[in-house]
């Protein structure tokens, strides 16, 4: 079994937040964008892109802010693996395949349906290239309809890891406890988050250095337990007071081992 870990892009804690609609730009006059809370996957609010006949242009998100892609590229790479994921649905059956999502040189036609469905796109970008995610209505659309979008996540420099047997998944309370002289115990809970412990052996130095850089910077990451299951993923940071994978894997000097601790972001992300 392999797992995937990549650094999240996006200005709002690693997400392309629809709660802050201003982070997206709408490059067409034949569409309107609004926040809605009925057609969502896991967040409190998704987007509804209303599309009218003859629409052209796109709904765009640019990764050019100082705290976004330009700051999160891995310095050891000049080309970067980009993975874009999200949940969408069209409410006009005849429009299936005529509205697309694109990032870099990759694009995918979206489908109509009664419920949101996941999409996944992969591309490669160079360090100096502009990076943009777009939802594009086809120019020949007839009538009016809507595209619903939620939980958009884009990662850069994702690595594939091969964990040993013994991977664990738990929930951890963010809580404090106190006792009284009378023997009573009080508990104050303000949240909970996921915690994964991923045992690893024979991780190349190049990947280990990348993991240590993410740990040192405290950047938000997307941990995917199964790339074929869009539900099996968690936003997280690398935990621990010392850098990950601190022991060499015998008999090699350029491969490392240890348990990678992934602390889920309490409350998830604002999508």
Image: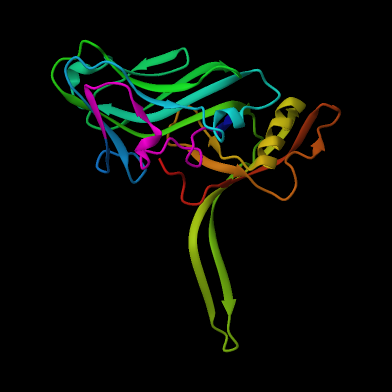
Could one spot residue 254 in this view of the protein?
A: yes
Residue 241: % across, % down = 72, 50
* Farthest residue, direction bottom: 182
Point 32% across, 43% down: residue = 45
The secondary structure that dominates the magenta segment is loop
Q: Is-magenta flag for residue 16?
A: yes
Point 60% across, 43% down: residue = 237
Q: Is-magenta flag for residue 20?
A: yes
* Farthest residue, direction top: 140
- Left or right of residue 111, residue 198 in this image: right
- Magenta residues, as a range? 8-33
Q: Looking at the image, is 29 positioned above or below residue 106? A: below
Residue 14: % across, % down = 50, 38
Of residues 147 and 259, the one nearer the viewer is: 147
**Colour basis:** rainbow
Specify the quadrant that holds the C terminus: top left
Point 64% across, 37% down: residue = 165
Residue 96: % across, % down = 25, 17
């Amino acid at each position: 079994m392999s797992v995937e870990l990549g650094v999240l892009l996006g200005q709002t804690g690693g997400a392309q937040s629809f709660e802050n609609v201003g982070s997206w730009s709408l490059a067409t006059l034949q569409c309107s964008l609004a926040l809605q809370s009925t057609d969502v996957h896991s967040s409190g609010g998704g987007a509804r892109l209303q599309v009218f006949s003859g629409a052209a242009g796109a709904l765009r998100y640019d990764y050019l802010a100082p705290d976004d892609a330009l700051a999160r590229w891995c310095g050891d790479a000049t080309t970067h693996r980009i993975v874009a994921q999200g949940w969408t649905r069209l409410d006009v059956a005849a429009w299936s395949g005529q509205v697309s999502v694109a990032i870099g040189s990759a694009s995918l036609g979206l489908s109509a349906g009664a419920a949101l469905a996941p999409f996944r796109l992969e591309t490669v970008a160079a360090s100096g290239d502009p990076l943009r995610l777009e939802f594009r209505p086809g120019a020949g659309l007839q009538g009016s309809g809507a595209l619903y979008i939620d939980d958009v996540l884009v990662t850069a420099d994702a690595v594939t890891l091969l964990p040993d047997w013994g991977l664990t998944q738990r929930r951890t309370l963010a809580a404090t406890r106190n006792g009284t002289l009378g023997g009573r115990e009080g508990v104050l809970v303000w949240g909970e988050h996921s915690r994964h412990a991923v045992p690893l052996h024979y991780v190349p130095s190049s990947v280990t250095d990348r993991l240590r850089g993410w740990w040192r910077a405290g950047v938000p990451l997307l941990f995917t337990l199964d790339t074929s299951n869009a539900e099996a993923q968690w936003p997280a940071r690398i935990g621990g007071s010392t850098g990950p994978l601190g022991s060499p894997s015998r008999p090699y000097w350029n491969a490392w081992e240890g348990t990678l601790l992934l602390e889920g972001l309490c409350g998830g992300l604002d999508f």
